[in-house]
Amino acid sequence: MSRYDDYKREVLTVSRRLSQQGYFGTKSGTAGNVSMLIEGEEAIAVTPTRMRYDVMQPEDICVVGFDLKPIEGPNKPSIETPMHVAAYRVRQDINAVIHTHQTHASAISILNRPIPPLFDEVTLAIGEVVDVVPYAPSGTQELHEGVVSKLTNRCHCYLIQNHGAMCVGRDLETTFTYVELLEKTAEVYSLALATGQPITTLPPAAVRQLVAVVMARQDREIARKNALTTAEARRA
Ligand code: 13P
């Protein structure tokens, strides 16, 4: 038993669901990785590197500090752990990160083209534009730096060129829904691009209204965390 057990169970549950639904590219492979921020600590629960999700157990999930030092767990953490930590450092509004190899988002990633705002419900959830992080080999500092440079746009989804996608959110369940919405919008965008016909995007005024709602939600989460930190500092 450890105070991280609930985090480990949740990371495993969502990872299994992503794997079974094919969001890691194959249903039996080890691609992709998932993490959760440990509330009130500079630490994350993250999937181990190169382990199949169908054999993974809660105790296989790693707990790692922002300094990348292991805190708990017998396995080596995902090679993208520095990318996850970098995301939590840059985006105070997020508590979960999912890196996928999902099919339709990957298709747009090889076109190296951002996905514009196309549907109300998608923009209202994930933000304005799904930007593309330039290609760099997996696990490299170059890739992590590329991700960080894009995260400041306050979107919840990113394409990683010739690699896959990354979604971030306030909790793991919500972030899972961003993975689904990204796949829907990427699939429809691919189908539309294939026709060669012009594509209509949401009107700018509608986008402004929807994005204001996304940012207000993010600001509320940042305020909640700041209030917790202040309360803890007072108790100390
Ligand atoms: P890990 O198995 O180390 O998490 O790596 C998988 C991956 O998708 C790398 O980008």
Image: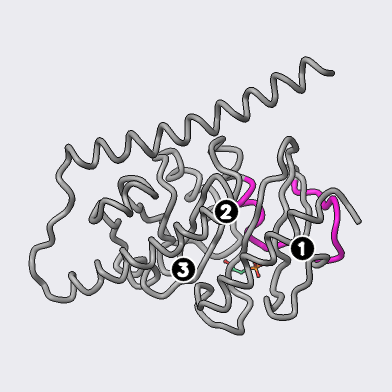
Residue 81's image quarter?
A: bottom right
The residue labelled by disc 1 is 61
Residue 72's image quarter?
A: bottom right
Name above or below for residue 150 compared with residue 103.
Answer: above
The residue labelled by disc 3 is 163
The residue labelled by disc 2 is 97
Earlier residue among tags 1 and 2 = 1
- Type of the residue with mark 2: Val
Q: Is mark 3 within 8 Å of ligand 1?
A: yes
- Gap in angstroms between the C-alphas marked 3 and 2: 16 Å
Q: Is mark 2 within 8 Å of ligand 1?
A: no
Label 2 Cα neighbours within 10 Å, binned few <14 / some 14-19 / many ≥20: many
Q: Position of residue 55 (x, y in %)?
A: 74, 80
- Gap in angstroms between the C-alphas marked 1 and 3: 23 Å
- Type of the residue with mark 3: His
Residue at image coords 59%, 29%: 224
Name above or below for residue 157 compared with residue 21.
Answer: above
